[in-house]
Amino acid sequence: MFGFCVFSQDYEAALCVAEDAAKGPTLRWCAAVAQQLHCTVSCGFPRREQQSTDDNEIGGKAKVKLYNSVMVVSPEVRALFA
């Protein structure tokens, strides 16, 4: 298992590699391997999550949070955990 650590000066670079768990390249890779090998695949990845803006905040921008995550995908390409 690999960890993912972001220091303040690396935040912009981390945004470039972080992905949405439901449609990112890590899910596609896990699904392909799980189907090919008929096994369950677990993979760590940097996940991004869009936070909604506060409607009362004038000129507010959506914030993006980063998480060190893991996904588990079955051979039937069901995301069991992300």
Image (cartoon, helix red, strand yellow):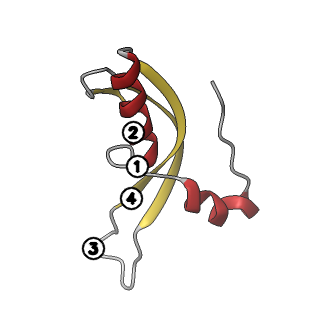
Residue at 38 percent of width and 59 percent of height:
51
Marks 1 and 3 sit apart, C-alpha to C-alpha, by 29 Å
Front-most of 65 and 15?
15
Confirm or deny contact between disc 2 and disc 4 (CB under 8 A).
no
Q: Which residue is mark 2?
A: 27
Give the residue number, with chain letter if any, for mark 4. 50
Label 1, on which residue? 24
Task: Give the residue type that dot 2 points to.
Answer: Leu
Q: Mark 1 near mark 3, Cβ–Cβ under 8 Å?
A: no
> In which quarter of the view is residue 32 placed?
top left
The amino acid pointed to by label 4 is Gln
The alpha-carbon separation of the residues under discs 2 and 4 comes to 18 Å
| Local SS, label 1 | loop
Mark 3 or 2, which is nearer the eye? 2
Give the labeled residue for mark 3.
55
The Cα atoms of the two marked residues, 2 and 1, are separated by 6 Å
Q: Nearer the viewer, residue 63 or 31?
A: 31
Q: Earlier in the sequence, mark 4 or mark 1?
A: 1
If you read the primary sequence from the N terminus, does the residue marked by circle 2 or circle 4 appear first?
2
- The amino acid sitting under disc 3 is Asp
Asked whether disc 2 touches disc 1, contact meaning CB atoms under 8 Å apart, the reply is yes
Q: Quadrant of the C terminus?
A: top left
